[in-house]
Image: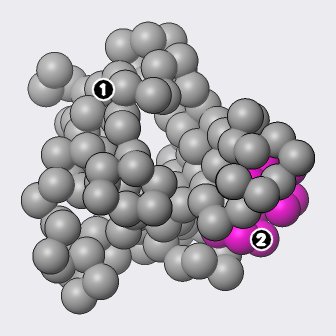
Amino acid sequence: MLVVTHRIQLGRAICADIGIDWIEERRTSETQGLLGFGLCIDSLHPESQARFNPQDWKGAILIFDELEQIIWHLLNSVTCSEKRVIILEQLKELIQTVHATGGLIIGQDADLSDVSVKYLLGWWRHQ
């Protein structure tokens, strides 16, 4: 399971609620990320502490929590600016990998719009 969000505190809380590690706890926890982990969209690239590789997530459950904010953050935040292109490429490969290998993709948000749903759908339709 991989949980992707746009804020560290939010991600930590979600991971604690569902019983998986937050990225920084992965190496020191009992499970050491065996059940998956959570991270911010900013870390969705190979040079981050996650050493992110989309191919590691074949058949995974992928949860985007606060999808509207994740998309806005990815496209507009200064914290993503230097790695924006690689993050977008990795996100596309992640979604395509999970979808093609029978995984589950969940996009959740209290204010979920058709625009965000169509954005996600567009990633795996262009394989």
Residue drawn at point x = 56 percent, y = 26 percent: 60
Q: Are marks 2 and 1 in contact (CB under 8 Å)?
A: no
Q: Is residue 51 left or right of residue 34?
A: left
Residue 116 appears in the figure: no
Magenta stretch: includes residue 119 = no
Q: Is residue 115 left or right of residue 84?
A: right
Residue drawn at point x = 16 percent, y = 55 percent: 86
Looking at the picture, tell me which residue is in the foreground, 92 or 119: 92
Magenta stretch: includes residue 14 = yes
Residue 46 appears in the figure: yes
Q: Position of residue 24 (x, y in %)?
A: 64, 66
Residue positioned most to the front: 28
In which quadrant will I find the N terminus? top right
Helix, strand or loop at disc 1? helix
Which image quarter: residue 101? top left
Which image quarter: residue 92? top left
The span shown in magenta is: 11-21
Q: How many marks?
A: 2
Residue drawn at point x = 17 percent, y = 66 percent: 84
Q: Which mark is residue 13?
A: 2
Q: Main secondary structure of the magenta part?
A: helix
Compared with 5, 62 (above or below) is above
Which residue is denoted by mark 1 in the rendering? 96
Q: Position of residue 102 (x, y in %)?
A: 50, 12
Q: Which label's residue is closer to the chain start, 2 or 1? A: 2
Looking at the picture, tell me which residue is in the foreground, 124 or 84: 84
Q: Mark 2 Cα within 10 Å, few/some/many (few <14, many 20+)?
A: few
Q: Position of residue 2 (x, y in %)?
A: 58, 43
Amino acid residing under circle 1? Gln
Amino acid residing under circle 2? Ala
Q: Mark 1 Cα within 10 Å, few/some/many (few <14, many 20+)?
A: many
